[in-house]
Amino acid sequence: MRTAVDTNVLSAIWGRESNARELSRELAEARRSGSVIICGPVFAEAMACPGSTESFVRIFLEQTGVQVAFNLGEDVWTESGRRFTRSAERKRRALRQEVKHEPKRVLADFIIGAHALLHADRLMTLDHKRYRKDFPELKLT
């Protein structure tokens, strides 16, 4: 079982949020049941987490056995572009209908979702609602 991890999980663990212990246990369990991976955008976002540095991120990943996929293939870029386009079109339609639009999504979220969809069995995230909307077939934990 391959588990992709979203930045918000790492941030919650490092920030010692109320769910940090449970997330740490889930991350360890994911590692025991297979491999754990993040994509390059998660690595870059993780470096910007409060109190984080590049060396801190690298040491954490090494100690926890989390692999980084820095080289994303054409499949991830294409799929993230497709999903990002659908989301943008949905927002434009909602604006034309004068319906309050959904929160702004950044491209990195679509890259993270596409990477998990195409190269992992599931995505560990705290943002289930966001990924369910644009990646309904992606298994979330």
Image: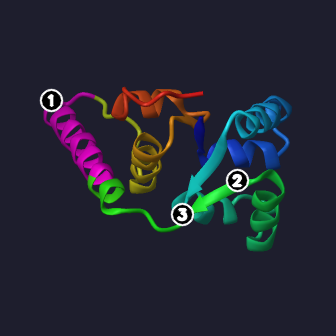
Is 93 inside the magenta-drawn segment? yes
Q: In the image shown, does 98 or 123 lie closer to the viewer?
A: 123
Q: Secondary structure at mark 2?
A: strand
Q: CA distance from mark 2 to mark 1?
A: 44 Å
Q: Specify the amino acid type for callout 3.
A: Gly
Q: Circle 1 sits on which residue?
A: 97
* Residue 41 x, y percent position in the rendering: 52, 61
Residue of label 3: 40
Work out how far the residue at label 2 is from the one at label 3, CA to CA, in angstroms: 12 Å
Residue 77, position in %: x, y? 32, 59
Q: Kindly identify the amino acid type of the residue bearing the numbered disc 2.
A: Val
Q: Name the image quarter holding the N terminus.
A: top right
Q: Quadrant of residue 45?
A: bottom right
> Looking at the image, is 102 positioned above or below residue 80?
above
Depth-wise, is mark 2 or mark 1 nearer the camera? 2
Position of residue 109 measured from the top left corner of the image (x, y, whole percent)? 45, 48
Above or below, 97 against 111 in this view is: above
State the separation of the CA atoms marked 3 and 1: 37 Å
Against 134, residue 15 (above or below) is below
- The image quarter in which residue 53 lies: bottom right
Magenta residues (range): 79-99
| Residue 57 coordinates in the image, percent (x, y) | 75, 64
Instruction: Please give the label number shown on residue 66.
Output: 2
21 displayed left or right of 96 = right
Three-letter code for the amino acid on which mark 1 is drawn: Gln
Q: Is residue 4 magenta?
A: no
Residue in the picture at 76% in, 36% down = 32
